[in-house]
Image (tube, helix red, strand yellow):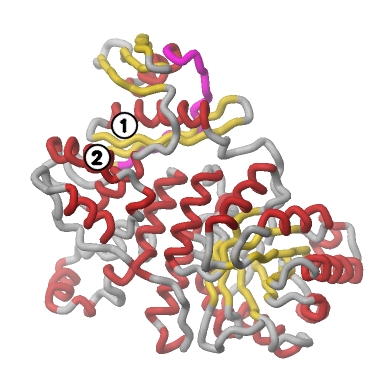
Amino acid sequence: MKVAEDYVQIFDTTLRDGEQSPGCTMNVEEKVLIAQQLEALGVDVIEAGFAAASPGDFESVQRVAGTVSNSVVLSLSRTREADIDKAIAAVEGAAKPGIHVFIATSDLHLEQKLGMSRQEVIDAAVWAVEHAKKHLDYVEFSAEDASRSDVDYLCQVFSEAIKAGACVCNVPDTTGYGVPAQIREMFRYLKENTEGGHDVIWSAHNHNDLGLAVANSLAAIEGGARQIECTINGIGERAGNTSMEEVVMGIETRRDYFNVHTGIVTEQIYPASQLLSKVIGVSIAPTKPIVGENAFAHEAGIHQDGVLKNATTYEIMKPERVGRLSNSIVLGKHSGRHAFAERLKALGIDLEAVNVADAFDRFKVLADKKKEIFDEDLFALVAEESDVPKRYELVGLDVDSSLDGTPRAKVTLLVDGQERSHEGGGDGIVDACYQAIKRVTGLDPKLERYQVKGITGGTDAIGEVTCFIRVGDVGVRGHGVHTDIIMASALSYVDALNRFEYRTPVVSGEAREVGP
């Protein structure tokens, strides 16, 4: 299998490697939502999960496979028969099914992890690729920890994998150990010295432990790679993976240098970044390239003057190119439903995935409280929409706090349609609210993470709260937005409890294989 010499495939592993980032796990419905956005982005390949890892992973791969039409959908698999068969079964409903088989190749991994000889690894790789090829045409083979492997041995392994039927050969920098010059030369050497090396797609999968994942991916392209494996917002194991938005815009902005292009619809980059951030409840750093709050901001007077005269003086990309619209006020309390829906559409939000009527009602309530409505507020309003039944609904909250007294909160919930109230005290006002909610519901989850973010500036800004709670082995995430941060905190906690009652857990107690 080959692609045009000037085309780079984008392989997105947000749903597999990205999900391994602590706190970034997703349930099935959330994975399907992200997969739909990935397809809107124009991603060539979606790694939907590791089907053999758990029943939940199998279901999520299966659901994504049945949802996506244009992208290849893969499941990761070890070189074990049971793994491969699970992966094949999970993707069989895909329009473009595939499998991603991996085994480690560094001497360190062979000796310390696998307890296998070099020849045994080759035999395992060949058997796995041949077995998968009997059922699927699209087979990718990965040599885990390739950047610390003997390059001539890698040539042997990849040669045999290609003979067995692999159409994509992935060269992972599993530990983020590589540097650009090394990665560039490794790809050049492998392509020239691997039998069949000019007949396959060479792929780069880089981790960001030294902050070099994007640089190493661009170097891999220079060395002959024509597929980059990456994640939205760069999430992933440890310090993360190659950032999709950074590597794509690196290619697009410096097409004069790299002489390649991708099929990514770049205007969908910012909506995808925002969606993932809301789904996993992890904020984007303000200084994050491309999608961070400050990525197109200018505070220095000289810079501001230059940008006002000509944007190209200090901006190498237009924000509109990545789906970032002007932060100007576009809507207010007199705006109609049609204008509201059109603005959501302009922001890249799929109107079919949103209850526009409910979101518009929330917008009107917000517009009565805020003088200025920004695009970020609209993203928050849409994210507020919960896709789970509401066993618990917050209908009343009274709080009392002072410098000298213990904070107190009285919470009123509808529980299965019946109103119940309780009071609670705590170390702070949020703790008091949560203690009262626990008493009303009879549940006593452990709060593992609590995160507050102000969506826009000003004292009337929307507060966005994400919490992560655990009951036994089940972990769930809750989300709440409100102009009152205490209300947002309570809404987030209640949302998490509803998800605990009704939804597939986002975290299982089962161990995961790390993968490439």
Relative depth, front residue between 189 and 303: 189
Residue 213: which numbered mark, if any?
A: none
Which quarter of the image is occupied by the C terminus? bottom right
Looking at the image, residue 304 lies above or below residue 5: above
Disc 1 crowd, CA 10 A, few/some/many (<14, 14-19, 20+): many
Is 18 on the left-hand or right-hand side of 140? left
Which quarter of the image is occupied by the N terminus? bottom right
Looking at the image, residue 406 lies above or below residue 512: above
Can residue 146 be seen in this snapshot? Answer: no
Please name the residue shown 16% across and 79% down the image: 310
The x and y percentages for residue 387 are 42, 38
Please name the residue shown 86% across and 68% down the image: 127
**Mark 1 lies on residue:** 488
Can residue 145 be seen in this snapshot? Answer: yes
Is 381 on the left-hand or right-hand side of 220? left
Relative depth, front residue between 366 and 138: 138
Q: Amino acid at mark 1?
A: Ala
Disc 2 crowd, CA 10 A, few/some/many (<14, 14-19, 20+): many
Looking at the image, residue 371 lies above or below residue 269: above
Q: Amino acid at mark 2?
A: Ile
Relative depth, front residue between 397 and 210: 397
Please name the residue shown 56% across and 39% down the image: 506
The question of residue 449 being in magenta is answered with yes
Is 158 on the left-hand or right-hand side of 360? right
Magenta range is 440-453
**Mark 2 lies on residue:** 462
Q: Earlier in the sequence, mark 2 or mark 1?
A: 2
